[in-house]
Image (spheres, rainbow, N blue to C red):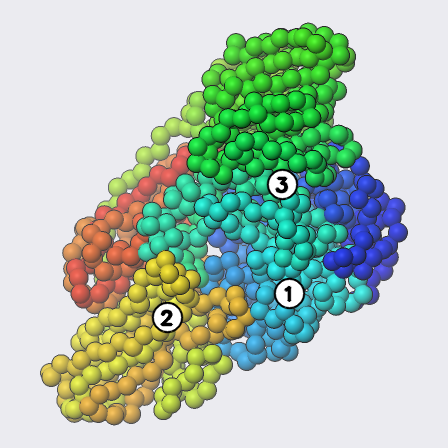
Amino acid sequence: MALSRRTFSALTGSTALGLALGSSGGPGAPSAYAAHSVPTGPAPAPPTADGNRHTIGYDRYSLLVDGRRLVVWSGEMHPFRLPSPSLWRDVLQKMRAHGYNAVSIYVAWNYHSPAPGRYDFTGVRDLDLFLRTAAETGLYVILRPGPYINAEVDGGGFPGWLTATKGRARTDDPTYLGHVDAWLTQVNRIVRRHLFTQGTGTVLLYQIENEFDAHVDATGQAYLSHLYKKVRADGIDVPLFHNDKLRNGYWVPGSFDTGGEKGGWLYGFDGYPSPSETPPDWGTFGPGGPKGGASASPSTPGFVPEFGGGWFDPWGGAWFDGKGYAESRRTRDAAYERRFYLTNLANGLTLHNVYMTFGGTSWGWLPAPVVYTSYDYGAAIDEGRNVTDKIAPMHQLGHLLQRVPDFAKLDRAADVTAKGLKVYHLTNPDTGSHVYVARNDGGDAVTTDLPTDAGRLRITVPGKDARLFTTGLKLGKRTLKYATAEPVLCLTAGRQDIALFAGRRDDMTELVLKCPVEPDVMRLDPEAAWAFADDELHVNVPLGQGGLTRVLVQKGETETPLLLLFADDATAVRLFPYDTPSGTLLVYGPSVLRHVELHGSEVRLTGDVTETTSVEVWGPRGIDTLVWNGRTLPTRVTLSGSLMTTGLLPAAPEVKLPELGGWRMRTENPEAGPGFDDSGWKAADKKTSFSTTPVPAGQPVLFADDYGFHYGDVWYRGTFTGSTGLEEIALAYTTGTQGLLMAWLDGEPLGTHRMPVPGKDATVRQGSWSATAAFPVREELRSPGRHVLSVLVRRMQHDQDGKGLDTHKVARGLTAATFKGTSPTVRWRIQGEKAPDPVRGPLNNGGLYGEREGWHLPGFQDHDWEPADFPRAARYQGVTWYRTTFRLSVPADIDASVGLTLQDDPYRAYRAQIFLNGWNMGQYINNVGPQHTFVLPNGVLRTRGTNTLALAVLSEFTTLSGPGKVGLTLLGRASGGVPVTPV
């Protein structure tokens, strides 16, 4: 697509910068944007859909938005992993409050497309609503619609129906590209209404494909070129990019045909280093060259579209020794974040996306084989939407990068050494400030001297941690000489400057201000000490002992006061800057600040409180009234110039959850019986398939996808005549991880076979599993006449296609049936899921009889079912359904996060699908784990009303089966929250 000068200006920001159009953008070409053409200055205002045109450009340091430097501090969340649109706002507001200025999202093709040519962007799939919500929250959006996304979802995001089509995926195959174009047309029709360049939204960047290293050749070039031109033709005019897997230097600018367009492509790379590794240098301090990370594209800013904020966990929990995501969070904790993310910033990576920031839930049949239901990921915001201790570095670094412009433009400076530490030294060429990252890769704390341009600093860095130090930093109208605490923000509120410094609890912090004229100093909290000598103000504070410590510096060389704030991590995360049209505010106290409005002298705040707290606000002059969540609070004016409540807001009250009882039960699988009417089922008699699994000689195609059954369980019934010589039936089948097969002959159980639990070896990433289950046929089942072989396969999910080998097309379900002692002719019929649920979508249901009959739905009449009590102890092969109702009465102003917990003897071999109000909230495998608690998101869960809970329990005959204990668990609570609309 040829670009007009106007379109190109929107892409590059060259109009705003007054720069001539320039280079081809190749990896070694000079940038069209001179490195020193944009001086250090304030970051752009938070993005909104303001109706104004905006420009997006870049140089080697950073993005340039409307001519201002922007450091992108982004977090990954997936709307499809939170099936309650009201809660999207909750997570986004928490991200913005805690320092993120962008959210990165995948858009999953399979989530929106139940069949070729059918697309659904309504309800929980409303992409337009998500993009509007992000804009209203003030976050940029990094959009990643594939077509392939990986993401540990079924088929890597490919829809199930794509497995039964011809054409090689992730290539320039015309059949595949036809489907891709139809998908992107639907996505881009929505996205182009939300482009930041057009002032109609906040979509800042757009990713093409995902970690594409399968065809780094003419095929891959043609494929990416097609996608690039397609996206541009659809009206997407923001910069495009790709995330190179493993930093191979693939797909740098100039590596494929962009239709003559120059400057619209960024290079990015992903990284997931282990906590046991030394943090890598993937930029300024790295080895350089095409495989050095950012050095592969020296004319574009350092960009990491995915950097590990945790890690996924497989069935059985091999990655974390069965301890689940709590162990992921422990091993990739706040110290991990400081150590690795500060290393990234030191290396010039100014576009930084943390995968995941909120992991969410792979509900229904969404998860890829390599993961179970929970996708908590050990992220900073857990699956129950609770902010964890991991948020502290994200909060501090995020606000720093938005509020202190020096960090958007740093050059490598003279090498510095400090005993026992790795030190990075950088400087801003415009302001002259210096930045030092001191990293301790050992296990013990190191106390040493750090040489700086301001003298030697005595510092301590804990083991496996890192610290950030600055010298020469402007703090409003004054200048910092040095500080041994980390800067978090500097802003102007009213007529005073405010600077916040933070560190670990009980650290003794020293801060020195350059003061050519002696100022007036007021210690507003008793923990602080200060002294003035030799044109320097020295302040010492033990962090955290009294909460927030305040020191007010007035007069001296300027009439603008400077308020110095000192906090430990737990205190710093309760300090929230917020920009309004009337000026900037800083709010201290709540656990989350969601929104601020100024109405004359009245400040209206909304947010959350978890523990008892006061609320303190610094803001424009003249404010005298404080309203919190609609309630006016008594206040006083403090010596620091703030407005502070005279009383305390109470902690969130206790939330009582009911015991679960009143269960009713019914066994199912009538399909196993010889008299079951399967005339409405599809005949499984195809001879050829587009699957990558060969069709066994002499067998019909039995692969479920070939008959339109793509998700969940699938039933087979094979009819044959005569079994007098039948000794054994061997059933070959292929599934995802933890797949299972059950067989019956004429209604009598033959047995169960299940795939092994993955270990820490190569099987932990294995996505497709094949086995043959051999069942001996008992003498009493051998007879002449008609016989019915019934087979239930829990197919689990399709493999991903990370290597571009069409592995998502590996068969699911039965692949062959062979008989020992006789060779009957078998006529097969197959049945899986019914038509997709119009509200819950195609991934909600599989092919169990109860699902097909609506037993999981809240309106189903179960009054004739048998009463049941837990714990159960039954021996049965097949499916038993349990249903009950419960009522919650959570006050409207309380956000309660609730889960369902199942516990039983781990020897018992059974699994349960959990349906809440008809929504498939996940699968529990009792003897495999590690997941025992399943998040029930508000909106799906009626927190003020009646809920229907159904469990579809699939039991093996080899052990007694539960369920055992089943109960509700309170995962978190807060006063505040967001309004929630039921889905």
Is residue 79 something that shows in the picture?
no
Q: Choose the circle earlier in sequence order: 2 or 3.
A: 3
Amino acid type, residue under disc 3 in the picture = Leu
Res 932 visible: yes
Q: Position of residue 139 (x, y in %)?
A: 63, 42
Which residue lies at the image location 67% right of the left edge and 55% below the top edge? 289
Q: What number is the disc on residue 769?
A: 2
Nearest to the observer: residue 535 or residue 285:
285
Give the image location of residue 789, x and y in percent. Answer: 25, 81
Type of amino acid under label 2: Trp
| Vertical comparison of 816 with 965: above or below | below
Identify the residue position indicated by label 3 in the image: 345
User: 883 or 221, which lies in front?
Assistant: 221
Residue at 68% across / 23% down in the picture? 454
In front of the other: 157 or 713? 157
Q: Is residue 234 left or right of residue 721?
A: right
Residue at 11% of width from left, 84% of height from top?
A: 779
Query: Which amino acid type corresponds to the residue marked 1 in the rendered image?
Result: Leu
Can you tell which mark lies on residue 721? none
Q: CA distance from mark 2 to mark 3?
A: 41 Å
Q: Secondary structure at mark 2?
A: strand
Contact (Cβ within 8 Å) of mark 3 with mark 1: no
Mark closest to the chain's N terminus, 3 or 1: 1
Tag on residue 184? 1
